[in-house]
Amino acid sequence: MTDEQVRSGGIGPMRPDHKPASFFADRHGMWTLARAEAAAEVEARIARDNIEIVRLSFADQHGVLRGKTLVASEVAGALRNGCGFPGSLLLKDTACHTVFSTFSPGGGVGLRELEGSGDVLMVPDPGTFR
């Protein structure tokens, strides 16, 4: 992978000043050479093994895996720009019931960011692909 491919994430248009278009993981300092190489390996494996869907998961406060399923063609974008999920997934009990009033001030837990069950962004770590 060239330095230019690492900076651009291997995808995306060039800006008029000939610098690569920015993406979330790059803007927030998460796009390293190691991450770029791991992302390229994930993308190659998905293509090589004809994988059609990929599940992005995170463990909630109870250790229950939550997340989203993507069609394989969306994985490259998610690795660079993240994938949104409803904030209510952070407010569930082990029976999958939302136990806080997400539409109240502070989302029921005193966090303005969770009011209204707004989206949260998860950025997958390509080094954990299985």
Image (cartoon, rainbow, N blue to C red):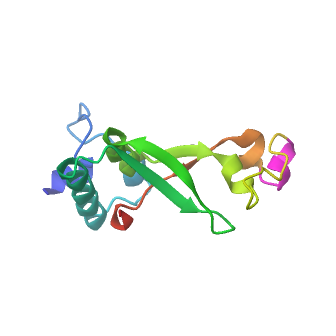
Residue at 73% across, 62% down: 94
Q: Start and end of the magenta stretch? A: 104-111
* Location of the N terminus (image quadrant): bottom left
Between residue 51 and residue 26, name the one nearer to us: 51
Residue 122 position in % (x across, y down): 51, 53
Residue 22 position in % (x across, y down): 34, 43
Residue 49 position in % (x across, y down): 21, 52
Residue 59 as seen in the image, left or right of residue 22: right
Residue at 23% across, 35% down: 14
* Location of the C terminus (image quadrant): bottom left
Q: Of all residues shown, which one is farthest toward the left?
A: 2
| Vertical relation: 8 (above or below) 59 | above
Residue 109 sits inside the magenta stretch: yes
Residue at 40% across, 62% down: 125
| Vertical relation: 91 (above or below) 85 | below
Question: Total marks drawn?
Answer: 0
| Vertical relation: 56 (above or below) 64 | above
Between residue 51 and residue 22, name the one nearer to us: 51
